[in-house]
Amino acid sequence: MSRLTREALVEHFHAHAKDPSRFRIGAEWEKEALGPDGRRLPFFGEGGVQDVLHALADRFGWTPRPEGEHLVALERDGDTITLEPGAQVETSLRPLASVAEVEAGLRRHMAELHAVTPPSIAWSSLGFTPFQDIAEIPWVPKARYGIMGPYLARRGRLGHHMMKGTTSIQASFDYSSEADCGRKLQASLALSPLGTALFANSPLAAGRPAGAMSFRALTWRETDPDRCGLLEDVVDASFTFERWVDYMLDVPMMFLKVHGRWHAAEGMPFRTWMERGFLGEYPDLAQWELHLTSVFPETRLKHYVEIRSCDNVPFELLPAMPALWKGVLYDEIALDEALGLAAALPGPRERLGLVAATDGLRGEWGARSLTEWARDLVAIAERGLARQAASGQDERRYLEPLRRRLEGDRGSPAEDAVAAWGRTGGDVSEFLAAIAYPRE
């Protein structure tokens, strides 16, 4: 078999371009299970997360995907359920044609989780675990996490908080060409602070206020500067697939898989692996695809554009996230308008991201509140969805929860959690009842 080349990797991205008629939406949703004392449901033990996966497989036809002797993933009809390092449960839906299908998939997943867990277990709608100290949360027994944990501990103060404490809603979108991909990356990266503010919902950590509306977003800022952030030096108006490939070739690797075993890469770049090999093996496209998952910018490119800037939120806001970005990215006029909005946002962009994480929609930027900037973004998305409705469903209704918050000046979702915290006096059981996904 011939070795990978830089040219082949560039062509790999070109090959995944799609005609707009074939555009789909992907969604990934992470959430955590909390016991009556507010502590994370662990992987091991009776009724633990591994038992939850077994129950899902037994009752709902999921196919088990173990690693060694431990069940750590499930698959069914193109959907997957996987575990984050602290036993957060993530569902990844197969690419779908509409936001309505995404909503249905998320509802089905939550109903199945409720069916296999007792009422004493609260599935939290927050973006960061609210009570437990991160050091107390056990690791999921996956070999990759055993390598990532020590590596990221050396790279940033909050790397383990990111790995074991955070949950989010993410969405993925197709591109039709290199130029289209570049525009989508530019818009979504530049406007990601507005997404952070709109969906900020992690105001607590270790049983007290975290000093931020999105503590989850703050953890990413102190995880690893080599693989996180807004990539302003990689993605701009002159973006090409070659630039992304070069960035990925030089990102220090945390891990690699050779001869069926995981190994610590100790920061070796993928480019070096391609040139020199490792234990006599050279990477193939599957290992390149794995490497693409090991960087964590606010938007990243795999064979689609993946937007990663939003906290986990109450259920009515979950489909609003892919609807917002579908309205912006799948309509050419809206995408032009979004790039114009991005150009109007004063710099520096990294500072804007910090304001969004800390203050949410109450933040001030460029003599305007982030609420005002976010209204502009939601209006662009609404017009984009209206134009898309000519050839399909009118999905503007999914933006209604965002519009109500913005028009009522209600701030980020985190403000509701803070209010519940105050209303319940910090009582764990009452607070969990307020922030848990309801059983239907």
Image (cartoon, grey):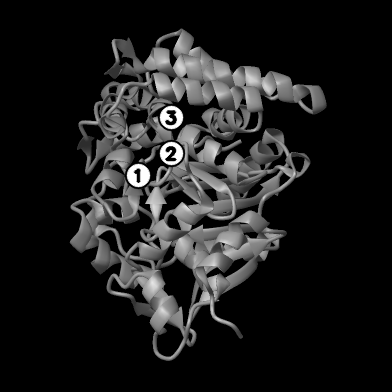
The amino acid pointed to by label 2 is Asp
Q: State the image quarter where residue 172 is shown.
A: top right
The amino acid pointed to by label 1 is Asp
Q: Calculate the distance from the C-alpha at mark 2 to the C-alpha at mark 3.
A: 13 Å
Dot 1, crowdedness within 10 Å: few (<14), some or many (≥20)? few
Who is closer to the viewer here, 251 or 66? 251
Circle count: 3
Asked whether disc 2 touches disc 1, contact meaning CB atoms under 8 Å apart, the reply is: yes
Q: Calculate the distance from the C-alpha at mark 2 to the C-alpha at mark 1.
A: 7 Å
Percent position (x, y) of residue 360?
A: 33, 24
Q: Calculate the distance from the C-alpha at mark 3 to the C-alpha at mark 1.
A: 16 Å
Asked whether disc 3 touches disc 1, contact meaning CB atoms under 8 Å apart, the reply is: no
- Answer yes or no: is residue 293 visible: no
Q: Residue at x 62, y 32 (%)?
A: 326
Who is closer to the viewer here, 120 or 413? 413
Quarter in which the N terminus is drawn: bottom right
Q: Which mark is residue 191?
A: 3
Q: Which mark is residue 233?
A: 1
Q: Residue at x 58, y 52 (%)?
A: 92
Percent position (x, y) of residue 175?
A: 63, 44
User: What SS does tag 1 mark?
Assistant: loop
- Answer yes or no: is residue 315 visible: yes
Q: State the image quarter where residue 27 is shown.
A: top right
Dot 2, crowdedness within 10 Å: few (<14), some or many (≥20)? some
Who is closer to the viewer here, 289 or 343? 343
Eye-nearest disc, 3 or 1 = 1
Quarter in which the C terminus is drawn: top right
Q: Which mark is residue 236?
A: 2
The amino acid pointed to by label 3 is Leu
